[in-house]
Amino acid sequence: METGRGARLVGTALLYLAVTLGSIIMILPFAWMLLGSVKDLGQLYQIPPNWIPNPFVFQNYVNAWNSVPFSTGYMNSAIVTVTVVLANLLTCSMAAYAFARIEFPFRKTLFMLFLATLMVPEQVTIIPLYIIMRNLGLIDTLFSLIIPYALFNAFGVFLLRQFIKGLPIDLEEAAIVDGANRWTIYWRIIMPLIRPALAAFGIFTFLFQWNNFFRPLIFLNSVENYTVPLAINFFRGQYTTDFALLMAGSAISIIPVLIVYIIGQRQIIEGIATTGMKQ
């Protein structure tokens, strides 16, 4: 008995040790960025490196904000990200409900085609997409970042469909008996029940859109249309890079991400408490 208890304690200790080491390794780059954002270039290039800045150079944040069009980038990123997230939540939840609950011809085949698009790298589709946007006259506009990605997201459809399939069908059957139509069931029954999945998917989409560098680099040309990742790229020169301002700019750019993550994390925890209604 004592031997088994001791083995469990050792196993638990090793598990906590592994989780702690993994957490430290994952947080090190973030900590290095934050500490590097309040160092001058002499401290950043110091060998051996010193983790604690001496002195703290908070002026880097002011210089970073004033050196590049951060306010414009923030505004553009917010417009693109919020629009895409809201549109994705609506369109993906509607498609997921249809694939999960409504019988129609070729439903399984269409869903497999949806999933197949996840296997196609974005770099493969960017040229045809660029040609389409150019023919529509949307190059160098925020619509080129919003329209293609607001209407279709295979990952979101898959994630929400799997969650909807786990919900009890009895609720919908009871609603149909009471005279509810498909739209009423979707909006008043399904949407509240899949709130945790919507919160998780919304956070994933927000993080991806806010941090996306590749698409804005391809579709945008004018500085007044630049998003935050492109604004940060101003710190990267042809021959030298001001890493102190680059880190300060990166720290500024993650503020909305941290806020959304903190708010969304609470929503997910609250939503998990409702999963007891799942079959």
Image (cartoon, rainbow, N blue to C red):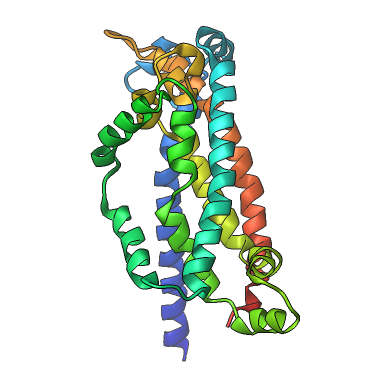
**In front of the other: 199 or 109:** 109
| Residue 35 in the image: above or below residue 84 | above
Quarter occupied by residue 254? top right
**Percent coordinates x, y for residue 237 in the rendering:** 33, 10
State the residue at coordinates (66%, 54%).
266
**In front of the other: 90 or 197:** 90
State the residue at coordinates (47%, 19%).
226
| Residue 109 in the image: above or below residue 66 | below
**Percent coordinates x, y for residue 246 in the rendering:** 44, 18
Quarter occupied by residue 218? top left
Looking at this view, name the residue that lies furthest to the bottom.
1
| Residue 226 in the image: above or below residue 155 | above
Q: Quadrant of the C terminus?
A: bottom right
**In front of the other: 154 or 202:** 154
Looking at this view, name the residue that lies furthest to the right.
178
**Percent coordinates x, y for residue 191 in the rendering:** 65, 63
Q: Is residue 224 left or right of residue 185?
A: left
Quarter occupied by residue 173? bottom right
